[in-house]
Image (tube, helix red, strand yellow):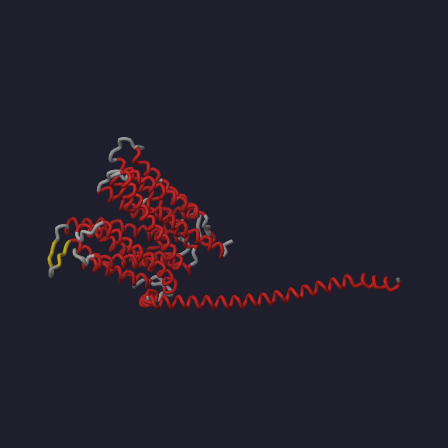
Amino acid sequence: MWTASTIDRALSDSIRDAALSSIWGALCGGVFLTGFALNVLGAGPQHIGVLAALPTLANLVQLLGSYLIEVTGDRKRLCLIAACLQRSLWLVIVLLPFGIVPDAGDWRVWIMVAIVGISSVCGSLAGIAWTAWMSDVVPEHMRGAYFGKRNMIASAAGLSATLAGGQLLSSWEQLAGSSVQGGFVPLFGFGTLAGLVALWFLARVPDRPETWHSGGSWDLRLFLEPWRDSNFLRLIGFAAATTFALQLAAPFYGVYLIDVLRMDFSTITLLGASSTAATLVMMKLWGPIADHHGNRPIMIVCGSVLALVPLLWLLAKPGSQVVLPVLAAHILTGAASAGLSLSQFNIQLKLSPRVGRSAYLAVFAATVGMAGGVAPVIGGAIYQALLADFHLSFAGYAVTGYHVLFFVSMLLMILCVGLVTALHEVGAAPPYAVILQLRNDLDPQTGISSFMDFAMVEVQRSERFLKELDQMTDELAARSERAVAGLLDRIVRVLERPWAKVKEFLRFS
């Protein structure tokens, strides 16, 4: 039976799964996967480009995942099987440096690319099944706060794993000389182990098959329903356009840091950590705000912030003060991206119907994934064809092709904010309510006041509890006295006649 205690256990196990899965993602992807491909397998730029595109393009398979969910009616089993395959495949990647493909040369890289591609497809299938599953596990009234907390813990675990993994490779390189090849074995091994253990916690989360229609026959025309839903179509348009606008320039920010601003990697690492720290802090705030004020105003506020971030990059130029605008850009990006991703996830579940929900989620993921996959390719092509040799001096400021690309991204983001204003969400507050709430939450004095209010409430609750406990004790004592008196009365009545006979016997004797 689905009770409050069942929900609490399910939500706790899901958070444990999130933390361990984040460790797996951090150690078996990102910078470590790129380093493994470059330093161990000898990958080139074309391999790295394909690796970067695979996870996004794999979202197209969510259309198939939606079909499988609706036909089989078992989203939990599909999620667990696909996620297990996704993570187990990394055992093959770990073995690539040890000659399982003898004399393969460049083929080792393409084998790794193929394995990552299959793993991404499995992960995409697991993702659509997990979203449809968890949409019924987490009560709607607490989705914002819960997923905010879950994402915050997952981000903290991923950041810790990244720092620990970097330290492991650095220590290994010092011990083994210039070679870090062997360091990836424990790195990927521990990451894979964490990912598989995460599935044990995920398997403990029950499904709620009674809350949704599935199984048997299923009409493929359900994939057309999201395109007929005008409000959901607005959400798809906003999310796809935003993803395209951001990803058009996103890959070039790192290149700009290295090639133009001449920053060292230690500084770049700290900038990345500042962005993650902002995400951790804001995830805790965005969740309750979404529950109280809605998701649409958060999308407007966060989209506006992200639209202004490129201005900070335009202000950054080589010099002693270069870190300040770039640091501000990283912090604002981390904070706003946290709110945007959380609100988009929540509103997907809110606007999609229970019947055929997986089709809505799959169409959303596939469309946004396509936009995110083609955007960096188009951005790179534009830069290479038109902006690589672009230089302009304006009022003593050197304008390069990177600046033009950042400016185009900013203009597109401004247009994207206009798209979300047409989105309708029942009960959503105006954007200024979110701004006022943020001002209140981020004000240290207000935070102290809120803490004191919380403490006073807890004291009052404790006083009420003590009074109730005292009253319960008095009632219990009174009941005990009445019970003892009744028992004694019964004993007296039972012994009354024998005692009378004893007294009569003694009188005659």
Left or right for 331, reference 6? left
Residue 235 rendering spot, x and y as whole percentages:
32, 58
State the residue in front, 316 or 145: 316
Residue 473 to residue 177: above or below: below
* Among the 4 quarters of the image, the one containing residue 233: bottom left
* Among the 4 quarters of the image, the one containing residue 326: bottom left
Q: How many marks?
A: 0
Residue 278 to residue 59: above or below: below
State the residue in front, 5 or 506: 506
Image quarter where the C terminus lies is bottom right
State the residue in front, 393 or 264: 264
Residue 76 rendering spot, x and y as whole percentages:
43, 48
Left or right for 333, reference 16? left
Q: Can residue 358 be seen at all in this image of the molecule?
A: yes
Residue 317 rendering spot, x and y as whole percentages:
17, 57
Residue 102 to residue 402: above or below: above
Q: Can residue 407 be seen at all in this image of the molecule?
A: no
Left or right for 52, reference 359? left
**Residue placed farthest to the top in the image?**
103
State the residue in front, 332 or 460: 460
Left or right for 172, reference 288? left
Residue 269 rendering spot, x and y as whole percentages:
26, 51
